[in-house]
Image (tube, coloured by chain):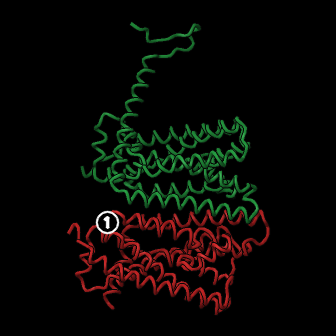
Chain colours: A green, B red
Amino acid sequence: MVDSKFQVPNNRYHINVDHVIKFIRRSNYYFKIWVLMSKNAFIMIASQKMVLVIFLLGKVLRFSFFVSFLYFLVQGAGNLAGYTTNQTIFFFLTFMVIDTTSQFLFREVYKFRQLIVSGDFDLVLLKPANSLFRVLMGGIDIIDFITLPPLYLATVYIGNLLNPSLMQFVLYFLLILSGLLISTAFHIAVLAIGIISLEVDHTMMIYRDISAMGRFPIDIYQKPLKTVLTYFLPIGIMVSLPSKALFGLVSIDGLILSFSFSFVFMFIALKFWKFALTKYTSASS
Amino acid sequence: MNKYIEIFKISYTQEFAYKLSFIMWRVRNVIQIFVAFYLWDTIFYFSGRELFGYDRSRILSYFFGLIFIKALVLSARAQDVAGDIARGEIMNYLLKPVNYFKYWLVRDFSSKTLNIVFALIESVVLFLIFKPPIFLQTDMVQIAFFILSIVIAVLIYFLLLFSVNSIPFWAPELGWGGHFLVTVIIVEFLSGSLFPLDILPYNLQNFLSYTPFPYLIFFPLQIYLGKIKGLVVIKGILVSVTWIIFLWYFMNRIWKSGLKAYQAYGR
């Protein structure tokens, strides 16, 4: 028999090894499901190569057009709210990192409405896996999977031109994680709204339009919009704060603020999801 | 003629059948204007001078003008043509005594009518929020050219949309892809709906002036703001009319060959 409880000498803390092993096994189980669903998503897209090429071309063009626009704009104006060309482009790249990573992971959200209106969500609820995991991460976006590596490389390249210290880089990285948590919370909230109102697509597009305000430094917006974008719809914390950290404009306090927001948002989103599940009527099934 | 008036009425009523969809589309437009307004206001606040040939009132007028021009030019129903072809539903229309092009042109006009009404309301609300300095054009010649350029823009967009949405005749799965690439990405950036094209280098602007895209948004607004006059306006109108003729010819060609290739899947 292995003693499942490892106790430290002063008896104040103890780690339940069983729980840790169970958590690792459970994570492994979900990772295998995720890989399987990602493979399925890949096979579906691979069968329509022209669609893949057109959407990929569209995304690359949109990215190139927007970077060119920012470049010519800030070159002509001298600066944007006090930020240089590279800094402005870096704000956009950071927005893209969070937005594209979220799209890559949570593409399945766009298909959720069909599950609800057809009643097929019943089949998800009956399976021995977390239903939220299935509808949130049930299929990756292959096009984003292709665009992510060059996007990360471009972000590292431009970020490197700004000569950040190690501390600034660590803060940036942690704030990106926090931003991704906020983005995840938003996606969960959209799913919950989908169950209650049967509306997903437009809610998602509105979320994307509002989050796209973070393509530019949040400093360009005036009060009260700036306050709303910082504290109520924390787009500023989600996408602007990481860039500012890399420029050396954010301290540890900013990191604490960001993680506090992301945990509170995640908590509210999960509670909202649980509440929404109680409103699911299984209509049409 | 009466049947097209009836199509207009039905289409107009149909817009209200999807109220949430319509409201969300308008909300998205307003959000985009918010972003553009703050962006350019910041640029002019910090620089405090004339940039890219605009002063503060002209640049803010450009983005207020966008609300109207987008409602007039870019609000269209003809994007549903691809779905009609891909699902085989186009057969229902081909068997009826209606001209399919006129049918969609009329539906476009009903969509534009509704959008322009909402654009007016939004403009008043946004004006009261921002209280921007607005440039009012008083030269009647410029206003006449502006109206003409809007008519040209509407026709170019309709022909462009119709041509792109004919792709499913050959590849039904590419309907949305083609629309996404041409009318969502390329039109958004190269028409001037995201930014005035004057910020681009001269050579690039010159190249773009020979494509149909600037004539959708940028060219009419340049005329309204008085940034181009006389021969430059006439040259632009000649180029854009040439594009209408070319796109009309092109659309007819692909439509004819598309109908030959069409196998009415799903019917």
Location of residue A88 by image quarter: bottom right
Q: Position of residue B125 (x, y in %)?
A: 60, 70
Chain ID, mark 1: B
**Which residue is at 56% across, 51% downward?**
A96
Whether residue A192 appears in this view of the structure is no
Query: SS of the residue at dot 1?
Result: helix
A277 vs A47, nearest the viewer: A47
**Which residue is at 70% across, 38% downward?**
A168
- Report the label total: 1
Q: Position of residue A35 (x, y in %)?
A: 38, 38
In this view, B105 is above or below B123: below
**Which residue is at 55% across, 56% downward?**
A210
Crowd around label 1: few <14 · some 14–19 · many ≥20 (10 Å): some
Residue B237 falls left or right of residue A227: left
Location of residue A135 by image quarter: top left
Q: Position of residue B237 (x, y in %)?
A: 57, 88
Quadrant of the snapshot with the N terminus of chain A: top left
Residue A31 falls left or right of residue A65: left
Looking at this view, name the residue that lies furthest to the left: B267
In this view, A71 is above or below B114: above
For badge 1, the amino acid type reads Pro
A9 vs A274, nearest the viewer: A9
Whether residue A239 appears in this view of the structure is yes
Q: Position of residue A130 (x, y in %)?
A: 36, 36
**Which residue is disc 1 drawn over?**
B172
Residue A214 falls left or right of residue B263: right
